[in-house]
């Protein structure tokens, strides 16, 4: 069984969006930007949902 090239492209787009959006949201919420780059890379949209649901960190 072969994976369709469409699914490969959608997976790459998902990863790119997550790697860009996760650190932006994390920076706004005073969280680790570098940590959430990896969170977006390895967790994808689930990582994006997690960082979006986290409360803003107060110092």
Image: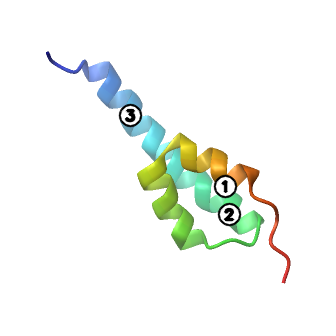
Crowding around mark 3 (Cα neighbors within 10 Å: few <14, some 14 to 19, many 20+) is few
According to the picture, the residue beneath numbered tag 3 turns out to be: 11
Res 3 quadrant in image: top left
Marks 1 and 2, Cα distance to the nearest angstrom?
A: 6 Å
- At horizontal 51% and vertical 62% (from top left) the residue drawn is 37
- Could you say whether the residue bearing mark 1 is in a helix, strand or loop? helix
User: Disc number at residue 51?
Assistant: 1
* SS for dot 2: helix
Residue 17 image offset from top left, x and y in percent? 52, 44
Residues at discs 1 and 2 in contact (Cβ within 8 Å): yes
- Quick check: 19 above or below 13? below
Query: In the rendering, at what x and y percent does residue 35 appear?
Result: 53, 70
Give the residue drawn at x 46%, y 46%. Answer: 16
Depth check, mark 1 against mark 3: the one in front is 1
Marks 3 and 2, Cα distance to the nearest angstrom? 22 Å
Sequence-wise, the earlier of marks 1 and 2 is 2
> Which numbered tag is attached to residue 26?
2
Residue drawn 40% across the image and 28% down it:
10
Residue 19 location (% of width, % of height): 50, 53
């Amino acid at each position: 069984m072969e994976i369709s090239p469409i699914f490969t492209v959608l997976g790459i787009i998902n990863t790119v969006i997550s790697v860009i959006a996760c650190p932006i949201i994390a920076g706004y919420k005073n969280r680790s930007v570098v940590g959430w780059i990896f969170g977006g890379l390895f967790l994808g949209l689930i990582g994006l949902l997690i960082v979006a649901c986290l409360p803003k960190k107060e110092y």
